[in-house]
Image (tube, grey):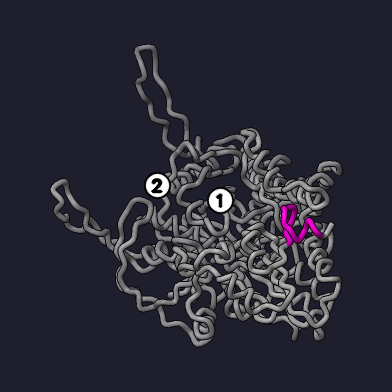
Amino acid sequence: MDFLSSSPAATSDDSSCDDSAGPITPDSSPMFGASRVEDLIGTPLAHFLNSPKPDVNVLSAGGLHFAPPVSARELSFAKPVRHIAVVGAGYVGGPTAAVIALHNPQIRVEVLDKDQRRVRRWNSPHLPIHESGLLDIVRVTRDGASLSPRENANGQAQVTLAERVPNLFFTTDSQTSLAKADMVLLAVNTPTKTFGIGAGRATNMTTFDAAVKEVALYTRPGTVIVEKSTVPCGTAQRVRQMLDAVRPEQPFEILSNPEFLSEGSAVRNLLQPDRVLIGSAKTPSGRRAADSLASVYAAWVPRSRILEIDAWSSELAKLVSNAMLAQRISSINSISAICDRTGADVDEIAKSAGLDPRIGPQFLKAGLGFGGSCFRKDIASLTYLAESLGLPEVAHYWSQVNSMNDWQRDRFAHKVIQRMEENLVGKKIAILGFAFKKNTGDTRESLAVDVIRVLLQERPGEIAIFDPCCLSEDIMRELEPILDTTTRDRVHVYPDAYQACEQANAVVIVNDSDPFKRSPGKKSRKSSGSAVIDTSSEQETKDIHIDGSRFSYQPCQSPICAEDCPDCQSTKTRGTISLEPVEWARIAYGMKEPKWAFDGRGVLDVPEMEKLGFRVDTLGRHTASRLTAF
């Protein structure tokens, strides 16, 4: 998310900046020095000279106990949190702010972003991102609600317990919000550098640094600064040094509180986190600041799941978690290549390995690999950290995880070309799925881009794209870097799967969105999935259940959408986006012979597809078409 410069509304967290303050190296880590002398000694001398004598408490007949002195710095972080500012209205900042506001009605939560269009969408009936359950939470906290009447033991309705006033706000006025904040959460974009020293591995901290400087200008002394962005190790110390440069000798505490959100289930991850990490300086004031953030989470997260550790460990833990998950994906994808050369089936191998309790079944599904803005970036950052520490073997080990991921996509695209007799000239290829992950509208670092790039080299007549969740403008923006004057007119985005596949020579499935999974032999019926983008501004009242409580919406006071609202424009062309399953028989009827289906996610019912006349090819799985090719 680009906080200090405008960025496309549907790609929040996307940064187009090409300048950077430089890569982070271990020399800037908290391990290499403290920021203030008073943090080292615990209590400044001035406190002993100017403060009253400590309290005296009788503990036992054996003697007296003097309460330890508390520094003025420590006391400045002991006040309750009443106002939180979240910098960045993207995939992390928006949902995090909404859930915090839901469980802390006494706290005013303001989300800041310089992109007026994005803020306008957060304040409208259309949110700029889709996450299941997010719209309900935003409407309760942004627009206000009332607790629905509850029944007593006799089945009689009790009176409404309380009215919930709005406590979640989205704004572009950073100066006013930061000036009132007790705590600031930094949730801005930290992409990989594409230039200079560390290009392709180091983190571009331009947007993050700009946000920190603005925070330093406007926040009050005693404000707690919290890293929510995924940042390199040592960033807490980097932030402290920047604050000292702008506001010398002013008390600030910096915490590391990495997010562990999975797109598509971010609300569930926030409501029921498996852990909350809070990294801080190991000083009295640092611990006070960590306790204040822990108290915010404790409103709904069990204390046993809130871990207070040092800042370096907290920052590194996020990179390691993502790297290890990505490692499992690349590992099973490497096995799928072996399966393609033998008679083995990768699904059977994954099932067998997953039954081992030491391994488990998660992240062992072979496919096109991982995309998005997290795994590749975090592995690159971990690789660069290892290089900076003089550990080339470690760097090489982790870099292979990304290399295998890139190779798997190229292998899949070349398989498509090979099966079609290495001639795509004049042929129509339908791409089903564009978002990097199913049932989301996030097009950032989509796997489809690499697949389309390779296919375009063979000069197909058309690349036809359909995704049930993505807006066409987001898709075309993501494809822009690989298009030129000769290829731009060959790529089109369609409003439904049937138009995209009409007269197509092949269908290529890039993500495992629910509509593509339905068995073609079964009659299509409406999915239980909710609309991806709720375009019903007339929905004024609704009873909902959120985390054990029942709420009733107050009338929505959202502003009317602007004329350039992308969601309204999308609705005009294809109606409300839904997760209704596609009818494969209908798709087969409109395709040209031979009908090829390339399944990059293992979602198709292969026997049923072959009954419809498809030739099916997958990654490492048994199909009649694949076996006859050898």
The amino acid at mark 1 is: Phe
Q: Position of residue 447 (x, y in %)?
A: 71, 64
Residue 268 in view in this figure: yes
Query: Which of label 1 and label 2 is nearer to you?
Result: 2
Q: Position of residue 202 (x, y in %)?
A: 77, 56
Q: In screen coordinates, is 317 left or right of 90?
A: right
Residue 276: which disc?
A: none
Residue behind mark 1: 252
Residue behind mark 2: 299
Q: Nearer the viewer, residue 83 or 115?
A: 115
Task: Look at the image and tell me in which quarter the N terminus lies.
Answer: bottom right
Q: In screen coordinates, is 108 left or right of 225?
A: left
Residue 234 in view in this figure: no
What's the residue at 82%, 60% (across, down)?
629
- Total tally of numbered discs in the picture: 2
Mark 1 or 2 closer to N-term? 1
Q: Nearer the viewer, residue 602 or 467?
A: 602
Q: Nearer the viewer, residue 488 or 96?
A: 488
Do the residues under discs 1 and 2 have CB atoms within 8 angstroms?
no
What's the residue at 31%, 64% (across, down)?
165
Vertical position of residue 1 compared to residue 304: above or below = below
Q: Position of residue 42 (x, y in %)?
A: 57, 36
The amino acid at mark 2 is: Ala
Q: SS for tag 1? A: loop
Rounded to the nearest whole Å, what is the CA distance between mark 1 and mark 2? 24 Å
Q: Nearer the viewer, residue 331 or 421?
A: 421
Q: Which residues are magenta?
A: 617-628
